[in-house]
Amino acid sequence: MPMHAFAPKQISIPRSALRSISRCISRSSLALVAVTLVAGLAGCTATPPPKAPPPAKTLPFQFARANLAPASGTLVSGSLRIIAQADGVYLTGEIGGLGRGRTHAIHIHERGDCSAADGSSAGGHFNPAGVAHGRAGGGAHHAGDMDNLVANEAGVARVDMHVRGVTLGGGGPTDIIRRAIVVHAGPDDYSSQPAGNSGARIACGVIEVDLR
Ligand SMILES: [Cu+2]
Ligand SMILES: [Zn+2]
């Protein structure tokens, strides 16, 4: 910035003031340079720089997805979209390769790790409140408890599920990002502890942020 073009040489300006004005000008548009010079020696009231935004991982997210892959030697797979809502999330999608007309348990499990062949690496049901297993919407239950899926005659189950009390992102105790969705061989009886006696884990997928 050519300071000498605006500041006559015969006027003695302290170096510190010059530096201060220079800082002001560097933050101002050219249209503001004259105003800045007039106000300059009276003191630059530069506003502090805006605070850096919080890291992305602490932000709530609108969408997530879970691509379910087979576990325990099955051919069960599917893709679910997870949409943030005011009081929880909405799950939507399809899971195929299930038994024709069969009923299968589905839950959110605590660990986003589907690496074990039997899905055991996903841990137990997502249960931040430390309560008993049960039925969603009917008394005490894990935050990860959901109603059973029913497959059609083609072995495909349509998922359209509202799960209350969980969040996407934010890093709080109810955050389900990087947790897992697990489908089981049998139905959840909604009462046996700790997991509804729903049998082997036949598909598993990690819940990942979807930035679309
Ligand atoms: Cu489960
Ligand atoms: Zn449970």
Image (cartoon, rainbow, N blue to C red):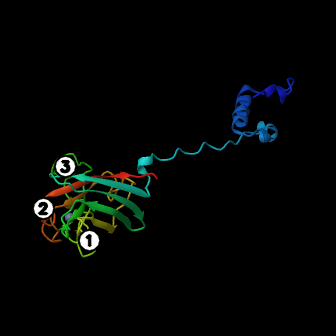
Question: Which residue occupies 22% across, 55% down?
Answer: 203
- Rendering coords of residue 75 (x, y %): 20, 54
Q: Secondary structure at mark 2?
A: loop
Q: Is residue 127 above or below residue 118?
A: below
Quadrant for the N terminus, please.
top right
- Residue picked out by circle 2: 199
Do the numbered discs 1 and 2 sit on residues whose CB atoms are within 8 Å? no
Using the image, tell me which numbered label, if any, was put on residue 136: 1
Q: Real-space Cα distance between discs 1 and 3?
A: 24 Å
Q: Is residue 124 above or below residue 193?
A: above
Using the image, tell me which numbered label, if any, was put on residue 121: 3
Ligand 2 contact, mark 1 (Cβ < 8 Å): no
Q: Which amino acid, mark 1? A: Ala
- Rendering coords of residue 34 (x, y %): 82, 39
Q: Which amino acid, mark 3? A: Ser
- Rendering coords of residue 169 (x, y %): 39, 54
Is residue 155 shown left or right of residue 24?
Answer: left
Q: Real-space Cα distance between discs 3 and 2?
A: 15 Å
